[in-house]
Amino acid sequence: MLYLVPTPIGNLEDITLRAIRILKEADIILAEDTRTSAPLLKHFSIDKKAYAHHQHNEHKAVAEIIRFLKEGQTVALISDAGTPAISDPGFLLVREAIKNGLDVQCLPGATAFVPALVASGLPCDRFCFEGFLPVKKGRQTRLKALADEPRTLVCYESPHRLLKTLQEFMDTFGTDRQAAVSREISKVFEETVRGTLAELKTHFETHTLKGEFVICVQGAF
């Protein structure tokens, strides 16, 4: 069995009892960054060595992991924070496991975009999750394709690109489009700022840009 196990995005209490049990029972734990996962495993008394599985080695590692699964071993995949394969490594392994007729289960748990969307105050019955937009190639094409998207748009952004992205959103969607920006979700300094895109850009021009950001933008109407 291949388990995808969500890990806390901030508060360690966000992990589930089932996630802890699966990690303790797994024969092999794969982690996006073993340096990040080590304190988490230690905190929950999970005495297992984690092996690196990240975007730079996942293509090479997949065949060996599939072999372990076929031998009957239980493999648990975790990312640095949140649910594996959501803007993190995991998709390739899941696809290959399914192709080989192996069982795959993803545990429910922490992910950043759901609390950000719900707390945004924007419609969340239908939404479009874009993850991280392309940094360079294809970025403008993607933005133009989203210009008439009627669903609430949700995307991730890093601190050093936030202001640029908000400006591009203003250029594409209009300055008066309602939006919300959440950062440090489930951490001590968690905050959500709501307003028009223009108001949000003005706000963050004079405030500290720290942590990972989730941007929610009202759909076209």
Image (spheres, rainbow, N blue to C red):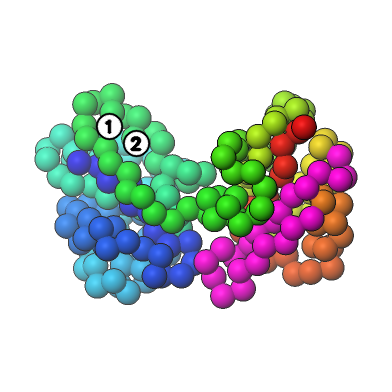
* Residue at point 48%, 61% (across, down): 9
Residue position for label 1:
97
Residue type beneath disc 1: Ala
Is residue 122 rendered to the left or right of residue 140? Answer: left
Front residue of 144 and 176: 176
The quarter of the rendered structure image containing the C terminus is top right
| Residue 215, position as x, y percentages in the image | 68, 50
Q: Which residues are magenta?
A: 174-195
| Residue 7, position as x, y percentages in the image | 39, 59
Res. 37 visible in picture: no
Is residue 25 rendered to the left or right of residue 176? Answer: left
Is residue 78 rendered to the left or right of residue 22? Answer: right
Residue 183 in the magenta stretch? The answer is yes
Task: Please state the total of marks drawn on the protein image.
Answer: 2
| Residue 23, position as x, y percentages in the image | 24, 58
* Residue at point 17%, 57% (across, down): 25
Residue 31 in the magenta stretch? The answer is no
> In the structure shown, which secondary structural element does the residue marked by tag 1 occupy?
helix
Res. 212 visible in picture: yes
User: Quick check: 34 above or below 103?
Assistant: below
* Residue at point 54%, 70% (across, down): 187
> In the structure shown, which secondary structural element does the residue marked by tag 2 occupy?
helix
The quarter of the rendered structure image containing the N terminus is top left
| Residue 148, position as x, y percentages in the image | 75, 27
* Residue at point 27%, 32% (across, down): 97
User: Quick check: 41 above or below 155?
Assistant: below
Label 2 with label 1: CB-CB less than 8 Å: yes
Residue type beneath disc 2: Leu
What crowding class fits label 2: few (fewer than 14 Cα within 10 Å), some (14-19), or many (20 or more)? many
Residue lying furthest left: 72
Residue position for label 2:
93
Front residue of 112 and 123: 123
